[in-house]
Every structure is written in structure tokens, then in C-alpha cells.
């Protein structure tokens, strides 16, 4: 399959809880992390979808998953013209042997765009089509070369950040867990993500807080703590400064829709 083959894409933002029994779909699915993590098994091969890794589920592949914490995932359903006549993992060629893939910086850029433009992206077929084709172009690239340690270090750093958003963290913590120096971590963030570790963390925390405000009935103080803010006032200040929003306004817009 090439990025120019006739495709039909359906993009959705989904959350999961509990365990789903073994089942299968008629379409291909690509599962990408937004927040949280999920254990998943595809055709007997187990792995985790989190900040460092996504999953490919071919049409007809039997799979199950387990998710016990708050999470949010972009799920791309893929149909080809041939899929209506023949359901086979080979339709994902050359991804037919792929079950899990690293979230490289180019894919991270697409996920960051989706985080900031989720509602428009999902509601606009044209935008979803363009975004999905860009994702396919990224997935069809060769895997990270073994000697490209920079991207592997960055993937570990991003995973650590995503797993510790609710707690205080320093660049020293992140670099130590990613297996690099603080200086190199700043260089990798600037080179691949065009931002700093602290700016990236701030953006993720705001995205998580907004998701929780929109999708859960949790109190604002609980949401503030889950998103890594000391209190409700700190969350309100950060939202107002960065997005010109308040927690109350976010929830009002959800009710109005």
C-alpha cells in the first residue's frame, strides 16, 4: 500500500476503560497515543500503546486490550477498495508485519497538531484525510536505525514525561531516565520538536486538563492535580495565559454543543 492508494479514513478520539474480550474488526486500525497508556495484544503479540509507541491492527486480526487509568487515543480506521472483497493483513503492506511502532519525532509532530486541533481535525473529512495521509507517509519510512540513538533517547524522554504529568519533574529527572545528559536533552528537543522540555510539558498538561474538563465530571481541583498543577488557581492561570481560556469556559462550550 502506498500513501497515494485509494483510501477511506475515519478518525476518532477515544478513551477506554477495563478489559475488552478478544475480538476483531473488518477495517484496519492504527492506534496512536494522546494521553495515558493501554496494554494491547494483537494476534498473540503483546505490547503497550503509550507516548513512545503506537499499534497497527490489521483487518481480521484478533486483539484485546486492558486500560485501567484515564487515557485518550487517536484511532484511525482504514478501508481500501480491496478491503471490501478480501480482509487480510497483507492489505497493510508494507506494514503487514508491523504490530507496534515507535512514535518518532515526525509522528510526534502530527500528534501534537492533533492535540491542538482535535475538534476541527475529527469533524472535517478533508483535514482528517490530509492528516491521515501524512501519518501514512511517516509510518512507511524505514524504522529508526540502530545507531540513531538521539531519536531513541527522545522517545524514552517523551514516554517518561507522559507517564509523570501529574507529578513534579525536572530536566534532570527526565534526562536521567532517558539515559542522556541535560544538555543533550535540550539539544534533542530543539532539533526534533522545536521546543524545550518545559514548554513541551506545559503544553501536554494543558491538553490533559482540557480533555478532562471536556470529557469527565471531575472537580476542577482534581483535574488540576491530575494534570500536574498545585491547585485550581495555578491551572486557571496557565489556561488563561496560554489559551485565553478558563476551566468554566471550557465546560460551558461543551454544554453549549
Image (cartoon, rainbow, N blue to C red):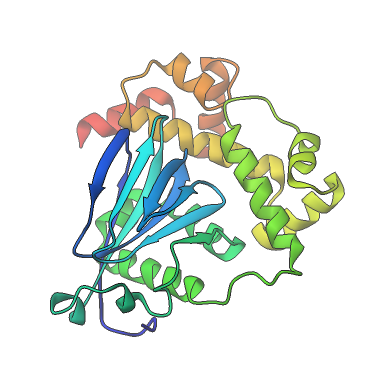
Q: Position of residue 120 (x, y in %)?
A: 32, 54
Who is closer to the viewer here, 137 or 256?
Answer: 137
Image position of 204 (left or right of 199): left
Would you identify the image quadrant in which residue 11 lies? Answer: bottom left
Q: Nearer the viewer, residue 195 or 174?
A: 174
Residue 242 in the image, given as x and y percentages of width and height: 55, 37
Residue drawn at point x = 80 percent, y = 56 percent: 187
Residue at (74, 46) in percent of width and height: 178
Location of the C terminus (image quadrant): top left
Residue sticking out furthest to the left: 85
Quadrant in which the N terminus appears: bottom left
Q: Where residue 24 sits: x, y (%)?
A: 22, 56
Residue 256, by quadrant, is top left
Of residues 125 and 15, the one nearer the viewer is 15
Image side of residue 59 versus residue 189, left or right:
left
Is residue 236 something one can see in this rendering? no
**Residue at screen point 57% across, 77% down:** 142
Q: Seen in the image, is 22 located left or right of residue 192? A: left
Left or right position of 75 against 139:
left
Residue found 41% across the figure and 37% down from its top: 71
Q: Is residue 40 visible?
A: yes
Q: How many marks?
A: 0
Residue 67 image position (x, y, % from top left): 38, 35
The residue lying furthest to the front in this view is: 44
126 up-or-down from 230: above or below: below
Using the image, determine if residue 215 lies above or below residue 23. above
Amino acid at each position: 500500500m502506498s500513501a497515494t492508494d485509494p483510501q477511506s479514513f475515519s478518525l476518532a478520539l477515544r478513551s477506554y476503560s477495563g478489559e475488552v474480550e478478544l475480538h476483531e474488526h473488518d477495517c484496519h486500525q492504527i492506534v496512536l497515543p494522546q494521553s495515558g497508556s493501554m496494554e494491547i495484544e494483537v494476534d498473540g503479540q503483546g505490547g503497550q500503546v503509550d507516548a513512545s509507541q503506537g499499534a497497527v491492527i490489521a483487518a481480521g486480526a484478533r486483539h484485546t486490550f486492558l486500560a485501567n487509568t484515564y487515557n485518550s487515543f487517536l484511532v484511525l480506521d482504514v478501508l481500501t477498495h480491496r478491503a471490501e472483497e478480501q480482509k487480510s493483513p497483507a492489505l497493510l503492506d508494507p506494514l503487514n508485519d508491523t504490530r507496534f511502532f515507535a512514535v518518532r519525532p515526525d509522528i510526534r509532530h502530527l500528534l501534537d497538531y492533533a492535540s491542538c486541533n482535535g475538534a476541527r481535525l475529527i469533524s472535517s473529512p478533508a483535514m482528517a484525510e490530509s492528516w491521515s495521509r501524512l501519518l501514512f507517509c511517516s509510518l512507511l519510512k524505514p524504522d529508526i536505525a540502530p545507531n540513531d540513538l538521539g531519536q531513541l533517547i527522545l522517545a524514552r524522554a517523551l514516554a517518561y514525561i507522559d507517564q509523570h504529568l501529574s507529578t513534579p519533574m525536572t530536566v534532570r529527572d527526565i534526562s536521567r531516565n532517558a539515559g542522556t545528559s541535560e544538555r543533550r536533552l535540550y539539544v534533542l528537543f530543539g532539533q526534533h520538536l522545536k521546543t524545550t522540555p518545559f514548554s513541551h510539558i506545559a503544553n501536554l498538561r494543558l491538553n490533559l486538563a482540557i480533555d478532562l474538563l471536556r470529557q469527565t465530571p471531575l472537580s476542577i481541583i482534581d483535574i488540576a492535580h491530575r494534570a500536574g498543577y498545585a491547585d485550581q488557581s495555578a491551572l486557571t492561570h496557565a489556561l488563561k495565559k496560554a489559551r485565553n481560556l478558563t476551566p468554566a469556559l471550557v465546560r460551558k462550550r461543551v454544554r453549549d454543543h
